[in-house]
Image (spheres, helix red, strand yellow):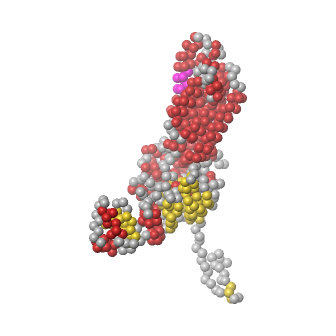
Amino acid sequence: MSRNARPGPREGGLVRPTLPVVFPTMPEVLIQGRSLEKRFGDLVAVDKIDFHVNEGEAFGFLGPNGAGKTTTMRMIEAVSPISGGELSVLGLDPMTDGPRLRARLGVVPQENNLDEELSVYDNLMMYGRYFDLDRNTIKERIDELLDFVQLEDKRDSKVNALSGGMKRRAIIARGLINEPDLYILDEPTTGLDPQARHVLWDRLYRLKQRGVTLIITTHYMDEAEQLCDRLVVMDKGAIVAEGSPRNLIETHTPRDVVELRFPAGVLEEVEGKVNDLSDRTEILADRALVYTDDAERTIALVGEHDLEPEMVLARRSTLEDVFLALTGRSLVE
Amino acid sequence: MATPIALRVVEAEARTYRRTWRGSVFTSFLNPILYLLAMGVGLGTLVDANVPADLEGVAYLTFLAPGLLVATAMQTGAGEGAWKVMAGIKWLQTWKARLATPIGVHQLLTGHLLWSGIRVLMVSVIFAVVMSIFRVAPLLESLVAVFPALLVGLAMASLTTAFTVSAKEVSYLPMYFRFVVIPMFLFSGVFFPISQLPNWLEPIALVTPLYHGVEMARAIVVGTEPAVAPWVSIVYLTALIAVGALFSMRPLRRELKP
């Protein structure tokens, strides 16, 4: 009998014919966290979070600085011991199987911790040797990886002579030297200029297409939207929402946003009128956000309410708006 | 067969060292030559003219050289435990990078101490060769004196590592060298017997690792009777290595695996 077919239930002695039920192959769960907790003394850095990451997906942890993203990553990486709950990574327990687990992980840390005095090649060779890979294998992989991150011509350059974006790319290459089953990137593009970020995103997108399971933490909503199939939004150590970027936006915020900018001091005076424009408005320091399903109609209403903003901008809702809706604060402050 | 993890750390240190080995080896030759010329030959001529009874009837150069050998090992060990460690946990954060791989904290520390031992060994062997060139002692005897030097170097590397990972602030390191390493260098029997020290200072000199190494090295090279039985010194220095490693683990774990 086929694994995907079930016999029909017997009812009153009759065998009722049923269509074979097809079970889609369930994706393998690579990481499972249950009530995962991390405390530093009295401080609760990660507050009983539940999440799972499937094989082959790009999974994001989105949240402002201090939300507990990095702490969560460090527990997954078997670097930081967990304080409570359960955590399984690649079927292993990070608390007891650390070395075996880390051998199968690729890690891009938040800080650039390459050896600045050594060449890109030496850095990668050294790192590969930590995994006890054979030197010739590492050599081959270095060639491939430097080609992949477009640093072939910087192979023998000292790291301290590289730009910030190049260092990040060298770290991306370093993290792949052991052909990891799970690739963890903590704030991969923080501090980079827009062009360097796009180069990195392009590389990460290619990894994703190859089927590498990615975990990305970021406080940039555009990064999360670009790269993540599924993500959790973290705030103050807790997960406040979970889903695909599109799904999160649809669930938590109307389709459009009309941004109104007013001259300094005027915003407080017109706050009441702005609030009348829609069921959901947010008054920020320098502008008002009016959430709506019909931007044109809302813009027309602005005139009808005798509001005279300096600037009116209509745009689609983003994860930033989701975060604002969930926490009342913006992601990057 | 898998390479033991601590040896992977040693290999990485060797790879880093390869970049600067020429300058380092040159300095390791130049340093003893300068010291033995200035203090041993230059100052030694004045000292020997007074025929001091405390120098066991040997030339000042012969008295000084084994002490300086161990003192150089001591300073090398302290340097590895200070700057190398600070770079690993703070400046370059390369130790953090290592812990994202199969390497664990105790293997990181073991590898670091092994490499420190290799550095001490290199510097000491070069010193011993220079000593034999200065005809202080035959090469073989000079090389035997490397053994106590290695023990002292390792003890200092281990204790200094414990200090560095506990202090965590780079500003403490110059103070450590000024108030611990340099006084130890000057007052542990390298330049003159500790019997010349004021009475209250003698017991302090007695507990320094350097003193124990100097006594052993001098016994090997000059043939003097050591003031402390060598086995006591060996046990004491070995214990210091263990104490340093032990007191490095907790702060290191707290710093790198919070």
Q: In the rendered structure, does residue A134 fall within the stretch colored magenta? A: no
Across and down, in percent, residue A7 comes to: 66, 81
Q: Residue at x 49, y 60 (%)?
A: A235
* Figure check: A145 above or below A248: above
Residue B166 or residue B26, whichever sits in front: B166
Q: How many marks?
A: 0
Q: In the rendered structure, does residue B34 fall within the stretch colored magenta? A: yes
Across and down, in percent, residue A181 comes to: 57, 59
Q: Is residue B183 visible?
A: yes
Residue A53 or residue B123, whichever sits in front: A53
- Magenta residues, start to end: B30-36
Q: Quadrant of residue A220?
A: bottom left
* Figure check: A172 above or below A279: above
Secondary structure mostly taken by the magenta-highlighted segment of the chain = helix
Q: Is residue B150 visible?
A: no
Q: Residue at x 46, y 71 (%)?
A: A251
Across and down, in percent, residue B214 comes to: 63, 25
Q: Quadrant of residue B129?
A: top right
Q: Residue at x 69, y 25 (%)?
A: B228
Q: Quadrant of residue B79?
A: top right
Across and down, in percent, residue A28 comes to: 59, 66
Q: Residue at x 46, y 65 (%)?
A: A326
Q: Is residue A61 left or right of residue A294?
A: right
Q: Is residue B149 left or right of residue A196?
A: right
* Figure check: A48 above or below B212: below
